[in-house]
Image (cartoon, helix red, strand yellow):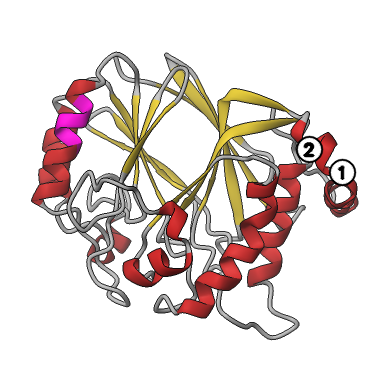
Amino acid sequence: MPLHLTSRRQFLTQLGAAAAWSSAEASATEVDESLIAILNDTHVGAQHPPSASIPTNLRNTVAWLLALPQRPTAVIINGDLALRDGQRGDYEHFAKLIAPLREAGVTLHLTMGNHDAREVFYEVLASDKAQQTAAESRHVGIVKLKVVNLYLLDSLKQTMSAPGDLGAAQRDWLAKALDANADKPALIIAHHNPRLGGDPKHFPGGLEDSEALWQMLAERPQVKAYIHGHIHHRDFFAHEGIHILNTPAVGYVADKKTSTTGWTMAKLGESGGSFTTHTHQADHAWNGVTVSLKWRA
């Protein structure tokens, strides 16, 4: 089960434990096949001032994950990996920060956001590029877990432009993939928020082809949830029976009065899932809060 941070002392103790582990101990750690970690909006730059919290937030999140008694079966970093416009140095720094996870054998999956540059990303993190492209010019994939399937989409339309889209080719690929794997609950993961649900304030910067996507998803009952970042906040909505989860940013927030940085641990099952928010600010109201969701029939 995920750990809840109840104090700054506990948080720092966990980080220290993670740093002290040997590689032999790390490889022996059990994996929880129903547990995944969801991070997004890391916004790592080539360089940051010594006082900057952005790289520290990701570094501390990685250390926390490594200190868990049971590791997640997958870690998803859902877009806006880079600071602003996807420079080579951004991805080189990002790669160093996530290296401890890879060295420990943790399975990582990365998606694209509007502050990323697909080709530069591939130049630096070449091993993350699929040998065969499922959807032309897009970074997509399916993660088949024990009880659910995760569909990782690419909503990057244009670097440094807030709105995103999937495009007809990617939606067609997704429809065929969902039909071919209809035996398990399906969770859709993309960086951009849909222009549907309960957050009209952020619709202009969201997914431009939301209506076409949702029409396709709604008629496939195996689709249970859509998980996104992009907004740098945390909310839970639903539209036509499909849960919409807005997960917090790792790097920074737009409004410190209403949000904070953090990540999400999801415990997934055949009939529903529980989603626990963890924050870098140990005394924040979101920290350790679990929301349990039931999948639609």
Q: Magenta includes 176?
A: yes
Q: Is residue 113 left or right of residue 103?
A: left
Badge 1 vs badge 2, beta-carbon distance below 8 Å? yes
Q: Within 10 angstroms of label 1, few (less than 14), some, or many (20 or more) residues? A: few
Give the residue drawn at x 19%, y 53%: 166
Decide which of 286, 167 is in the foreground and name it: 167
Q: Quarter of the image containing the C terminus?
A: top left
Give the spatial CA distance, label 1 vs label 2: 6 Å
The amino acid type, in three-letter code, at marker 1 is Ser
Question: What residue sits right under mark 1 in the picture?
Answer: 22
Quarter location, residue 142 = top left
Looking at the rendered structure, the secondary structure element under dot 2 is helix
Question: What residue sits right under mark 2 in the picture?
Answer: 26
Where residue 128 appears, as percent x and y from the top left, is: 43, 53
Q: Assign the magenta stretch its main secondary structure.
A: helix
Quick check: 191 above or below 255? above
Quick check: 83 above or below 80? below
Give the farthest residue toward the front.
131
Where residue 24 appears, as percent x and y from the top left, is: 83, 36
Where residue 121 appears, as percent x and y from the top left, is: 41, 67
The amino acid type, in three-letter code, at marker 2 is Ala
Q: Magenta includes 7?
A: no
Q: Which residues are magenta?
A: 174-178
